[in-house]
Image: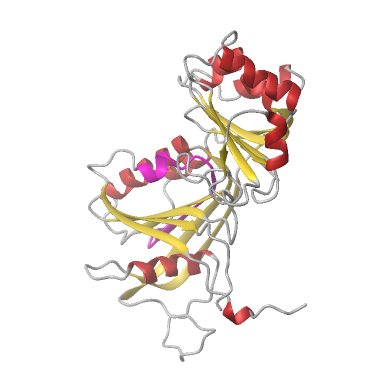
Amino acid sequence: MLCPEVLNFKSPRHHVHFERIDCNRTDSPATIMKHYYNHVVSLIFPQSNNIPDSVINCISDDSDYYRIKDLRVSELLNKQFIDAFIKKGELTLLTIENKIDLCNTMAVTPTGVLIISLVRDDFQKLGLEGNASYFDYKTNTRNVVTINLTAEHFIPGKKNYERVKTALENHLNLIFDVILIWEPPDEKMCPSSVAAWFHERGYTVSLCRQKLSYKTEYRVNIPIITDVFNNTTFFEWLGFFSISGEIKNENTSKYVSTYECPKPNILVDQVKYLQYTGFFSNRRIMQIFNAIKEYLLTENNLPWCSFHVQGFSDSPVSWDLKEHTFFTDGDNSYTILFFPKAKCIIRKSLSSNNKSRIAL
C-alpha cells in the first residue's frame, strides 16, 4: 500500500465573512438570531478592572439546561408537548455524543423544525420523504428529513401527522441522548417546565450548568482599531490570546515559533478573559450582545472588546437550516468586535464542507 504524499494535501478551505454594522441601527443581527446551537461563549475586555455585572448576569442567570437520556424522537410529536413548548416560547434541542459524519443525529430549532439526519439504511427503514445530504449527494449515503412541527396541518388525525407518527413509532424507533433549552414566552413561566414534562413521562432528566474559566493577563500589548487596521491579523490575535499563546511584548526574532502583536498596538495594564462552556440559545446570545452594547455606550476608556461564540461541531445545521457536516474541523462560529460609538465588526467562520483532496 502506498503512503499518501502528505505534502500534496491542499490546506482545507475555510469560509470567513466580515460584516460591519451600526449597533444603533441593527436590533438583531441575523448572524446571532439564525445560529441556534451555541456551545462556547468567550469575552475579552482590555483595560478593564472587571467585566461588568450586567454582562455576567446575562450569561449566568437562569442559564441552566437539561439532558434527557434515551429520548424517543416520536415523543416530540405529542400534541400536548407541541402546544406547550414548541408553539409557545422557543425550544432548542440537540443530540449529543453522536458524530455528524458517522451517526444518526437529530435537532429541533427554535422555529419549531425537527431535523433528522440519517444514514442511508435507517432512512430507508423510516419510509419518510427526505433529501439526499448535500455533502453525499453523489453516493447518497445520508439523507435529511425535515418536519415543521408548527405547521397548521400537522395535528393528530391529519394524514401527514399520522404517517410521520407511524414511521417514528413502528418503522424506526430512533432514540437519542439530547440537551435542550426552553425559553418561555412569559417571564412568569419557569424554563424548567419542559424538564418536568419529560420527568413525568419516565425519562431520566439531568440538570446541566455552564462551566466557567477566566484569566487576567497583565502588561499586555493589544492591537488597536484604526481606519486601515487589518481584520485578519486582529482576529488572529484574539484567537492567540484566547488559547493562552505566548504573546511577546518586545521585538522578537523572525522565528516560526514566536508571535508578535500586530501593529499599531498599545500597552495596557491588564486584559480580562472570560469563557463559559455549555449550551446557549440564540435568545440568550442576543441578550449578551445587548448588554455589551449598552455597557460600551457608557464606558469611554475601553478601546474595544470582543465577544466570541462557538457552535457545536456535530450539530446537523450551522446557520438557520443550512446543513452542516464535519470533514475538517466542524467549525461554525462568529466573533463580534465592539468599538466606540456603537460600531462593531462581525467575523463569521464556517469550516469547508469539501472533502480533502490530494493534489496531483
**Quarter-of-image position of residue 286:** top left
* Residue 25 screen position, x and y as percent: 22, 42
- Residue sitting at 48 percent across and 23 percent down? 89
Q: Which residue appears farthest toward the bottom when viewing the image?
A: 253
* Residue 73 screen position, x and y as percent: 68, 27
The answer to whether residue 196 of the structure is visible from this angle is no
Q: Which residue appears farthest toward the front when viewing the image?
A: 138
- Residue sitting at 61 percent across and 24 percent down? 192
> Which residue is nearer to you in this view: 359 or 108?
359
Is residue 329 one of those drawn in magenta?
no
**Which quadrant: the N terminus?**
bottom right
Tell me: residue 125, above or below residue 142: above
Tell me: residue 346, above or below residue 157: below
- Residue sitting at 58 percent across and 60 percent down? 329
Q: How is the image coloured?
A: secondary structure
The answer to whether residue 327 of the structure is visible from this angle is yes
Q: Is residue 98 left or right of residue 327?
A: right
**Which quadrant: the C terminus?**
bottom right
Point out the stretch of residues depicted in magenta.
Answer: 30-49
* Residue 319 screen position, x and y as percent: 46, 44
Q: Is residue 200 left or right of residue 243?
A: right
> Which residue is nearer to you in this view: 152 or 199?
152
Tell me: residue 164, above or below residue 213: above
Is residue 32 one of those drawn in magenta?
yes
* Residue 229 screen position, x and y as percent: 28, 70
Tell how many labels.
0
